[in-house]
Amino acid sequence: MKDQILDAIKQYDTIIVHRHVRPDPDAYGSQGGLAEIIKESFPEKKVYGVGKEEPSLHFMRRLDQVEDEIFKGALIIVCDTANAERICDSRYALGDKLIKIDHHPNEDPYGDLLWVDTTASSCSEMIYEFYLSGKDKGLKISDEAARLLYAGIVGDTGRFLFPSTTEKTFSYAGELIHYKFSRTELYDSMYELKANVVKLNGYVLQNFKLHSNGVASVELTKELLKEFDVQPPEASLLVGVLGNVAGIKAWVFFIEEDDQIRVRLRSKRPVINGVARKFNGGGHPLASGASIYSWNDKEAVLKELDQVCAEY
């Protein structure tokens, strides 16, 4: 499949790379890393990265503004996006050929070519593997591509702490750090928090609720976020904090936005993506997301999460 993807890249003059809505470092890293590899390898091609920008990830890269006309006849590659409905920028449908590269469970096998590897720690890890498989066939990697891929791997492995981190992950990361970029600057940009977000973190630690069977929950209403002057994407950065609390098997953050309540699910061992699927979401076995549209639905989520932990 990697050879087929490379052949497709060679055939098209215009290539547009997408990723999922509400991006994280792996979404930006895989999208940008792939775009930079293609640019470095085939400078004559027109390569774009598109989607709604996430201000907190401006340190990684800025995205391109592309006219509708450019999509016509283009090769479209979507990174790190399990479901077609979560592709950021619906104009992907205007392209000539669609490729899916992802590491989430393949529940929506969209695209003309699909490369899905659920054993990969991140989509960024897959993009580096794509480069390795094609470096004798014309692929080149730049320092900027290496920086983006490393950031994506670090982000999706929780700085190499998550169970998805494998020997291959460490091997690839060890190779990427030989390129010219500052890991210190990268880590600072990824993990430094503004003072108001740190204060919200303190609130979370003081006010999370413990339920039966090792379930914990946090409720962050619009009013509370306004009180701390924190935006929902910033609040989502705090989801992992309960992973250090003894006795918790799985936990959920309910983060209220204008039109819905984001459900951020995390687990130490029990598989929780089945719970996410029941509430308009999905994701990895131990890290998933979903959406509810009323606080009345919160108890249903907790009931499902409690059942999963009870059966573990």
Image: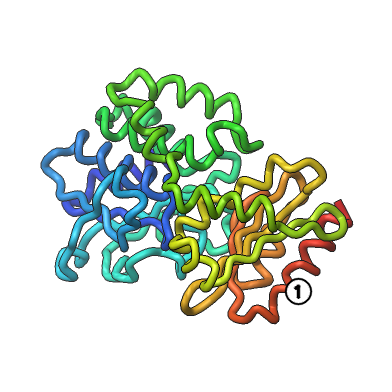
The colour mode here is rainbow
Q: Residue at x 70, y 57 (%)?
A: 208
The answer to whether residue 90 is left or right of residue 293 is left
Q: Which of 161 and 10 is in front in this view?
A: 161
Q: Which of 289 and 73 is in front in this view?
A: 289
Q: Which residue is drawn at 18% across and 38% down?
A: 42
Local SS, label 1: helix
State which quadrant residue 245 falls in: top right
The answer to whether residue 43 is left or right of residue 219 is left
Q: Residue at x 27, y 70 (%)?
A: 94
State which quadrant residue 19 falls in: bottom left
The answer to whether residue 140 is visible is: no
Number of marks:
1
The answer to whether residue 156 is left or right of residue 210 is left
**Looking at the picture, which amino acid does disc 1 mark?**
Glu
Quarter of the image with the N terminus in it:
top left
On the image, the x and y values in percent for residue 85 come to: 46, 70
* Mark 1: few/some/many CA within 10 Å (<14, 14-19, 20+): few
Q: Nearer the viewer, residue 102 or 292?
A: 292
In the rendered view, would you say 203 is above or below 138? below
Give the residue number, with chain letter if any, for mark 1.
299
In the rendered view, would you say 124 is above or below 299? above
Q: Residue at x 77, y 62 (%)?
A: 305
State which quadrant residue 18 falls in: bottom left
On the image, the x and y values in percent for residue 9 come to: 27, 46
In the rendered view, would you say 217 is above or below 226? above
On the image, the x and y values in percent for residue 224 come to: 54, 68
Q: Nearer the viewer, residue 301 or 226?
A: 226
On the image, the x and y values in percent for residue 172 come to: 46, 25
The answer to whether residue 57 is visible is: yes
